[in-house]
Image (tube, rainbow, N blue to C red):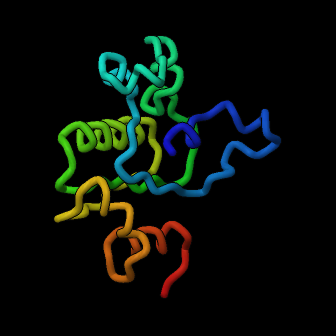
Amino acid sequence: MGILLAGGWQADYGVPDDVLRGSLSISDLFDLHPLLSTHINGWMSLDADAAQRNSPLFNLPQSAGELVVSHGALETAEFARQSQAYLTAWRECGLPGRFVETPQKNHFDVVLEPGQPGAPLHDAVLQLMDIGE
């Protein structure tokens, strides 16, 4: 998801730079460098240049709508670290963003939260879309 927020690709597809007015990122990988030394890279075949080029953390847009970042509180420290690092970098670029906490959720059930009325991520999606229930 984060790579869609990167700048520079929009003109190739004839869409405006601000085609995404807001975004929700749940447990994304924003820095692919840690994957280089894992078994996952066996099928990804990334080198350092490809990891840099395809890591949203290093390809932030110049302008963008609001970003909502979340990860399950029961996820690994790496998902939490990457989510927080991306949100911090996003804000340092002067872009609007916030973190929404999802307690008692892991990597597999946190993605269900936006579809659950009353859940914090559900409410955040409605706010991003500027609609209410």
Residue 68: where, in percent of width, then height?
41, 56
Against 90, residue 69 (above or below) is: below
**Along the line of sight, the residue nearer the viewer: 80 or 106:** 106
Q: Quadrant of residue 8?
A: top right
Against 54, residue 85 (above or below) is: below
Which residue is pictured at 82% across the width and 42% down the height? 14
Residue 7: where, in percent of width, then height?
62, 34
Which residue is pictured at 31% across the width and 57% down the height? 108
Which residue is pictured at 45% across the width and 51% down the height? 96
Against 70, residue 44 (above or below) is: above
Residue 43: where, in percent of width, then height?
46, 24
Task: Check the image and name the residue furthest to the right.
Answer: 14
**Along the line of sight, the residue nearer the viewer: 8 or 26:** 26
Residue 84: where, in percent of width, then height?
28, 42
Q: Is residue 33 left or right of residue 58?
A: left
Q: Is residue 130 left or right of residue 89?
A: right
Task: Check the image and name the residue furthest to the top.
Answer: 48
Q: Quadrant of residue 57?
A: top left
Q: Is residue 86 left or right of residue 129?
A: left
Against 124, residue 56 (above or below) is: above
Which residue is pictured at 75% across the width and 45% down the height? 16
Task: Check the image and name the residue furthest to the bottom.
Answer: 133
**Along the line of sight, the residue nearer the viewer: 97 or 106:** 106
